[in-house]
Amino acid sequence: MEQVVALTAIAFLANKIIELLKYLRAKDWNAAFTLATIEVSGVIVMLIAAAAKVTETLVLPGTSEPIGTLDTASVVLLGLVMTSLSSTIYDFKKAIDGGDSAKQPPLLTGSTDAI
């Protein structure tokens, strides 16, 4: 079961990487910057969580060891995977929210429309 969870999470990460490339190709700078910022923040948060005493013994779904014992590459991968999964869930919520009640302002200001 852990392997299925891990492989599914990695597939979500691959999907978000492709999404980022599409935004860059379309020159949608706000969407690309927002997605990259989300991923970087996930890595930073996971690195802090792995080093913090309060969460160092936390075992995440799809892993068998506490995050405090994982090597840096594993913690970075977990950060990317966790934010990719949460971003995918947010995209799903946004897709079914016909009234756009969860709309947020853009991260970049000024004209960032795709060309």
Image (cartoon, grey):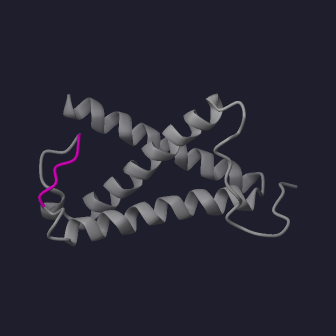
115 or 85, nearer to the observer = 85
Q: Main secondary structure of the magenta part?
A: loop
- Would you say 71 lies left or right of 25 here? left
**The C terminus appears in which quarter of the rendering?**
bottom right
Q: Residue at x 67, y 54 (%)?
A: 104
Up-down relation of residue 100 to residue 56 (above or below): above
Answer with the quarter of the image where residue 18 lies: top right
Answer with the quarter of the image where residue 55 lies: bottom left
Q: Residue at x 64, y 63 (%)?
A: 33
| Magenta span includes 59 | yes
Task: Provide residue 35's location: percent of width, then percent of height.
Answer: 58, 56
- Would you say 92 lies left or right of 28 here? left
Answer with the quarter of the image where residue 24 lies: bottom right
| Magenta span includes 29 | no
Read off the magenta span.
57-61
**The N terminus appears in which quarter of the rendering?**
top left
Task: Provide residue 100's location: percent of width, then percent of height.
Answer: 71, 39
How many numbered discs, if any?
Answer: 0
Up-down relation of residue 51 to residue 73 (above or below): below
- Would you say 101 lies left or right of 58 here? right
- Would you say 75 lies left or right of 44 here? left
